Amino acid sequence: MSFIVRPIAPGEYAAAQAVWDACFPEDAAGYSDYYFQSRTKPAYVLAAFSADGHMAGALHALPYPLRFGGEVKRCAMIAGVATLPEYRHKGIAAALIRAAHTRLAGEGVCAAVLKPDVDFYAQFGYRPFAWHESFRVAAGELSVPEAALHVPAPAEMLACYEAFAAPYNGMMVRTEADMALMRRETAVLGGETLAACGAYALCLPGEGGAELTELAGEDVLPLINALAARYGAVHFRLPAGMRQRGLSTGEKLMFSMLCPLDAPTLLAGSGAASLDELLSGAKKPNCTLEFC
């Protein structure tokens, strides 16, 4: 069976959302409406079409400006790689990824980043990039002074984020509008955004506590302690090697993979002499936080 891979037309946007909802049914209850209205747009979507013109799969390549050293690099986040069940195992996802890389490189994008699946994405040149440690803290577990929680303004969130991001390569360059969007996304998912003592968290309550889908600030422990008291327990991630008093070593997990599309441009100004050195974090540790 042959397929054509190409950028979608604006009139095909609804079909792209239908593919997303079919492949990620947990998002169809409301999140995909938000995502297609606020996070992506037709210009970011590539799709595969069958000979009869039916959209069989799609991929989103979102602008993702990342800071390396003192420079901001044009990068992309690959998200929503999806193939309808009846078209799977025919090479559609691979064709979409290769087409996305060709298109992005032609637009001057120097690297693509995505959520890891080493067994699949390594064949396209993706390599481990950022590692996190996963933790769980129950109410009363930390010996930290109590902190009052509040709902932060986007400007406060951005200041916390920038202080958190400063030691790392690979952090997205954000604006206040980005922070407002993250608050909205958390609300769409049924959560809340809370802050204390120069840190904020995106909190999704659930059975057995809350998941902190993002946690940022120079000193996050007072916030973690207050949130554990609020929800009974919290599950969260921190960049691997980020030591916080009172926390034992967490479970290490790969959080993102990076594929260089223009290695010289990616390395320029990063402080690393080679791609291996950049990926190792030997000169400056790597970190990413956000994913669809």
Image (cartoon, rainbow, N blue to C red):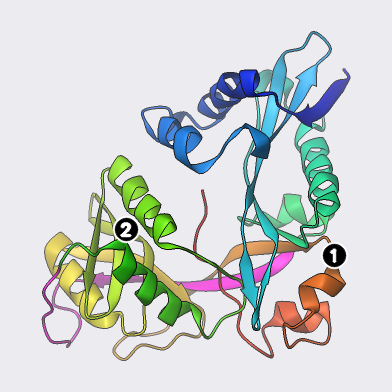
Residue 200 picture location, percent across and down:
29, 69
Q: Say which amino acid is labelled 2.
A: Glu
- Residue at the spot x=52%, y=54% of the render? 291
| Residue 262 numbered mark, or none | 1
* Residue interval drawn in magenta: 127-149
- What is the spatial separation of the Cα atoms under label 1 and label 2, in whole angstroms? 36 Å
- Residue at the spot x=29%, y=89% of the render? 246
Are the residues at dot 1 and dot 2 in contact (C-beta closer than 8 Å)?
no
Q: Say which amino acid is labelled 1.
A: Asp
Q: Quadrant of residue 259?
A: bottom right
Residue 196 picture location, percent across and down:
20, 75
Residue 250 can be seen in this image:
no
216 sits left or right of 51 in the view? left
Position of the N terminus, as image quadrant, is: top right
First in sequence: mark 1 or mark 2? Answer: 2
| Residue 111 numbered mark, or none | none
Q: Quadrant of residue 127?
A: bottom right
Q: Which residue is mark 2?
A: 211
- Residue at the spot x=75%, y=52% of the render? 121
Q: Secondary structure at mark 2?
A: strand
User: In the depicted view, which residue is nearer to us: 69 or 30?
Assistant: 69
Q: Residues within 10 Å of mark 1 (few under 14, many from 20)?
A: some
